[in-house]
Image: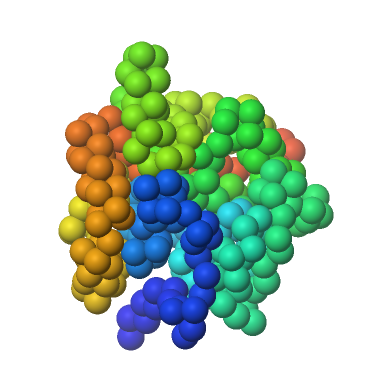
Amino acid sequence: MAAQEPEPVEPADAQEARLPLAERRAEDAPGHWLLARLGKRVLRPGGLGLTRRLIARAGIAGADVVELAPGLGRTAVELIALEPRDYVGVEQDEDAAGWTRRAVGSAGRVVRADAAESGLPDASADVVVGEAMLTMQSDAAKRRIVAEAARLLRPGGRYAVHELGLHPDSLDPETKTDLRKQLARTIKVNARPLTVAEWTELLEDAGLRVEWTGLAPMALLQMRRNLADEGLRGTVRIIRNALRDADARRRVLAMRALFREHRDELRGVALVAVKPEQGSTPSRPNREEMP
């Protein structure tokens, strides 16, 4: 019998559940929280499909898992369904932490802390997961968060990340800077995506070894992706809410136009990096092309 699909996160009291930065006007809210306000629950650049490919490679079953910045808890549901030995979410935002607590229930716990300073013990995790959060950090903050993930991992442990990527690796610096500026203006977040080579370098500079890379189109606001990620009912909910809010609708259309304009340069990228055990022999990295 086929395994039952995990249900999307939608608390019983979702009408009353407060979203992060709910007080911000639609024209000023960070793009991901604006989309959440409209009902979108999968907020990862490569979609739910890339998330599932990532965690399938990370070895979740029976593992002690830490998820950094779990947000609304959508990936937490996927992780819990794979039956880890332990799940801990590290979430700084109080409202987001509440969503993840409701998502995992008694199957895990959530601590309120900065992803760069979780307060959890050294070498306490077999797997650390982080999605769509390093992209929104400065270069220095990226390095601090990756260092924290490496600190939490036991030797042989895996760091699984899913972020926004730039393509190709040879993209010139001027184009990168211009695209980052456009992203910042449109999504109201200082997004700093990297090429696959740059994401790999970031992880390996922290002493990790990248063993797998997966790619997916950056199709966050395309109808086909939303139907796959949110289902028909969820997609209808998003459209209905956008039609009712003109300011939010303008923002969504601007984001969608930007993503379409730069669809050749933007990617969802996922990587699994291993904390080497002493005396281990490096394996050849496996890089999957976009489906």
Residue 247 drawn at (x, y percent) = 29, 53
Tell me the quarter of the picture where residue 171 sits.
top left
Tell me the quarter of the picture where residue 178 sits.
top left
- Res 85 seen here: no
**186 in relation to 35, above or below:** above
**Relative to 18, is 165 on the left or the right?**
left
**117 in relation to 113, above or below:** above
- Res 26 seen here: yes
**93 in relation to 201, above or below:** below
The quarter in which the N terminus is drawn is bottom left
Could you tell me how many numbered marks the image carries? 0
Q: In the image, what residue occupies the spot 47% across and 85% down?
A: 12
The residue nearer to you, when weighing 177 against 272, is 177
Residue 133 drawn at (x, y percent) = 52, 46
Residue 78 drawn at (x, y percent) = 46, 68
Tell me the quarter of the picture where residue 169 sits.
top left
**Relative to 249, is 136 on the left or the right?**
right
Q: In the image, what residue occupies the spot 44% across and 79% down?
A: 15
The residue nearer to you, when weighing 278 against 55, is 55
Q: In the image, what residue occupies the spot 51% across and 39% down?
A: 136
The residue nearer to you, when weighing 93 against 142, is 93
